[in-house]
Image (spheres, coloured by chain):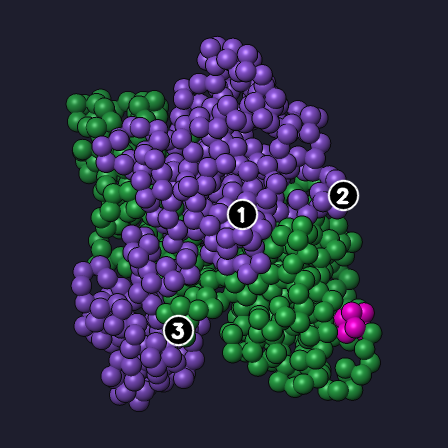
Chain colours: A purple, B green
Amino acid sequence: MKREAATATGAGKPLPLAGLRVLDLGQFIAMPFCTLWLAWLGAEVIVVESRRHLTSRTAPPFVPGHEGDPDASGYFNLLYSSKKSCTVDMTTAAGRDLVRRLAGVVDVMVDNFSTGVLEKLGLGYDVISGINPGIIAVSCGAFGRSGPMKNARGLHSAVNLFSGVADVTGYPGGAPRILGGVLPDPLSGTYASFAIMAALHHRNRTGCGQFIDLAMYEAMMTLIPEAVIDLTLHDRDPVRIGNRDRVKAPHGIYRCRDADTWVAISVESERDWVALCRAAGHVEWQADPRFADAAARRANVGALELALEGWTRTMEPQRATAALQAQGVAAGPVLRCDQLLDDEQLQHRKAVITTEHPTAGVQRQLGLPWRMDSAGVEYRRAPLLGEHTHEVLTTLLGVSEAEYARLDADGVLS
Amino acid sequence: MSAEAQALPATAATGPLAGLRVVELGDGTAGPYAAKLLGDFGAEVVKIESPGGDSARQRGPFADDRPDPEASGLFLYLNTNKYGIVLDLDGAAGRAALDRLLARADIFVTNLPAERLEAAGVAPAALRARHPALIVTTISPFGSDGPWVERRGDELVTYAMGGLAYSTPGIPDAANDLEAEPPLHPACFAAETIAGLAAASATLAAVHNRARTGAGCHVELSQHAAVAALQHRDITTYSYLGGTYNRLLNPTTIGRMPNFYLPCKDGYVAIAAVIDIHWERLVEAMGSPDWARSAAFANGAARTANWIELRRRLIEWTTTVTGDELYALAGERQLPVFPFYPVRKMVESGHVHARHSVVDIEVGGRRARMPAAPVAMQGTPWALRRRAPRLGEHTAMILRDWLEAGNVRSGGAL
């Protein structure tokens, strides 16, 4: 195995999922994000893709000068780190047969096609579990694989809008807004990784595999238990409150000196409030009856925020943070995505990882958010298109060189 | 046993994680949610509270807004499928009881600050030395070392530093005015839930590592890194092309048009029709108005170049149609259009009912509903085996069953 482009963390330590084999039929982000974490933990992840129906590899950003090159898509290369690429055209009968045979030799299979697509390809769980009863199959859709809306079309925005999360996201008195970071996708992928590892634990004890139906809106709904309970308990709809909190005040994101720069500040206790007044150089706020306690500050939140921003507007986010943290107040700069890779704390934790790719060169991304003292993690580059087709088919499926040549000539391996 | 307890179903431990023993020393959302996931999926979880109880007991929602530490909706949701005991960890007897529980546990999950763990005699390094097979999962705002280790962080601050606030409102929504629309945090415990989920996933990775090597593990998770780790799409652009993340509504941020989040007659709707076939279907759904056939919108490049006019024209149409009408049109015409669902409409929908996405919960003697399983594992179905414990409800039983230790009580641990 090529290891020249690896960033190993905990070199020499065992990889938790070594020996686990995963067939990745994922599209876009949700399931590829799930198998990304599994691959980093040591699983062998085999991605089936086809030159005739490329998806993520056609998505920008591309390495400048390599626009359109399927090996130069950043969208693909970051999501497919540490995985293997096997090109098989599933629109051909012989291609579908190869994928069925692959499903017979893996522990886990994941997909997030539209509901029913896998069944039409003859790769549904009923077929696959007949070949491989121990398989753990995760099928992920915006609305899941059952229920009256299972065929509804939905991107991440539909998941945001249906799950109730948009109802608690918005400026005071304003419209529901859509959460950033296409969060339903990676969040669903993370739930899938949990479910797969739980199902493996069960299989280790019982020998039984299973089908896992993941509805992305159900994953997102886990963010809003308070809103669901409040509504059903009191028949009371959520009220959008911006960055405020229904208990703490001040609690918000405040304008800093330069355009579009911000600091997040959260005051939990009266001790915190006194510390904030000291940090801001406004000890007179302590004596202001409008700010006497959390209830008063919530009642006068407009005046409170105006006063606080009078101070933060004179500061850079990092300086305001340093002043507040020095007095023990929870505060931090609001970081843009482009600032995360340069963040000193993430870098210190080695959460910012580097891979080197023949086409894309050295690129950075964020790795697993935890460290393990007795286990390793392995960050390798994404595969070139079809890089592992020969290896996977001949080694795993025992396809002969003659059969391989025939499949290749017939376009099945496109 | 009270009538309330009898009213709730008590099923045998049949989840995929049955047989695992977990001790949780958690507070708020992150630690308790990690342990809830393990418990909801079959592990035996013992939650340890101080005599004052988990702070989520003070959070609500409470029935009729009357504070009651035994009837906080958020606490009751986060602590299903757990036993609850009270230990006074300021005393030697309480600390001894905790350590004896840990000697019989597979997993210890905590999100208490490092100094509290140290004081309770359960600092990770000491625990790893005393119990080599124990998996010790710690969740902290920024991690256990690095330049931010002494700084305070909470839900808002870790979320803002993880990049999600800056990118909200997110695609196909976006800020119209950078000054008037600050980066946005949803009114829920999003960062803590993400951290709890990632910690549960990480814990299972360590369980698999232990199954093969026999070694326990310190799983050390940063809530800040957990939020950041879910960022993919926008990170990629920065790594590949450099530049500054743009949160304004424009084609640079959103990509090709129309991909909009718009008001409709009775709410809001997301419309994505960036590929020609979807645009054609959208034009037909609008009744083929003349403007849509004009040169200004004749192809994808023109539609993107003239996006401001396109958006205005679309709003003229969407504000004459209800969300339900748009949803029906989307189904008939295979259009990527999806309306906003308030939490109320989502909870009351036939889809949520059919999938059992929410289940009954009693809050202060009243019926409410809460999110159920985040994933449907069909071989090992999710079950609400046990409502959240009252403060100290199982202290005597757990100390007896796990420790068979009469002298712990006489030592004043309780």
Q: Using the image, name the chain to which the residue with label 1 belongs.
A: A
Across and down, in percent, residue A130 comes to 70, 26
> Label 1's element?
loop
Mark 1 or 2: the one toward you:
1
The main secondary structure of the magenta stretch is helix
Q: Amino acid at mark 2?
A: Thr
CA gap between label 1 and label 3 equals 30 Å
CB within 8 Å, label 1 to label 3: no
CA gap between label 3 and label 2 equals 46 Å
* Residue underneath mark 1: A41
- Could you say which is closer to the camera, residue B50 or residue A166? B50
- Image quadrant assignment for residue A126: top right
- Image quadrant assignment for residue B46: bottom right
Query: Left or right of A346: which side holds A116?
Result: right
Residue at x-position 22% and y-position 55% = B178
Q: Using the image, name the chain to which the residue with label 2 belongs.
A: A
Mark 1 or 3: the one toward you:
1
* Residue underneath mark 3: B151
* Residue underneath mark 2: A206
Magenta run includes residue B250: no
Residue at x-position 72% and y-position 69% = B103
CA gap between label 1 and label 2 equals 23 Å
Residues rendered magenta in the picture: B397-403
Is residue A184 visible to us here? no
First-in-chain label (1 vs 2): 1
Magenta run includes residue B399: yes
Asked if B322 appears above or below B299 in the picture, the reply is below
Across and down, in percent, residue B267 comes to 38, 45
